Image (cartoon, helix red, strand yellow):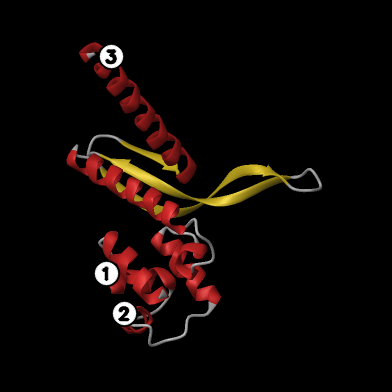
Amino acid sequence: MIGDKIRERRQQLNMSQEELALKVGYKSRSTIAKIEKNERDLPQTTATLIAKALGVPISYLMDWDDSSEMVFKDMNRKTEFRAYLKLLGWNVSLSGSGKEEFVGENDDGSPSYIESDVYTFSNGKTTFKLSAQEFEDFIEHIDNEIEYILDVMNKKNS
């Protein structure tokens, strides 16, 4: 059920009910607790806000398609990568920015933009920011580099 998915994802992010409530616009955690216990109906607009706060597509929470498991694996990948960066001394935070990213053209040829979340990386000396897409590209690049190194090591050992 949707409440179970919300609780599971919130806990995966080490986010309290209070933090989620504040991100969604509730004044206390009690509403989130009721939603997670499936004791309260969830309007789609609120579900959309919760999905955004949890960094998942609404389709994952609502079970609208079969791709949710793939989305969840991708979220796990990002969470694991953020944990790895933390081990290396980097703090990673996610926030909305109002920054817009070009995503293509509308039917009339005008540019289409979406608001992007921003990942802020800081190690006490250096701080930099990446859009959600840039962070995804960064992870993909690291994955490719690791795969290449493993291939080279396997060829040397063959």
- Residue 92 x, y percent position in the rendering: 30, 46
Q: Position of residue 119 (x, y in %)?
A: 39, 46
Contact, CB < 8 Å: mark 2 with mark 1?
yes
Label disc, if present, on residue 155 of the rendered structure:
3
Residue at disc 1, secondary structure: loop
Could you tell which of marks 1 and 3 lies nearer the N-terminus?
1
Q: Secondary structure at mark 2?
A: loop
Q: Residue furthest right?
A: 108
Mark sitting earlier along the chain (3/2): 2
Q: Earlier in the sequence, mark 2 or mark 1?
A: 1
Residue 29's disc is 2
Disc sitting over residue 16 in the figure: 1
Is 117 or 155 nearer to us in this picture? 155
Q: Amino acid at mark 3?
A: Lys
Q: Residue at x 29, y 42 (%)?
A: 81
Q: How far apart are the alpha carbons under marks 1 and 3?
A: 47 Å
Residue type, numbered disc 1: Ser
Location of residue 96 (image quadrant): bottom left
Considering only vertical position in the picture, is 68 above or below 144? below
**Residue ID at (63%, 48%):** 113
> Would you place residue 138 above or below residue 76 in this image?
above
Is 125 in front, or is 37?
37
Q: Amino acid at mark 2?
A: Arg
Image quadrant for the N terminus?
bottom left
Which mark identifies residue 1?
none
Q: CA distance from mark 2 to mark 1?
A: 8 Å
Q: Quadrant of residue 145?
A: top left
Disc 3 element = helix
Between 152 and 123, which is closer to the camera in this rendering?
Answer: 152
Q: Residue at x 24, y 35 (%)?
A: 125
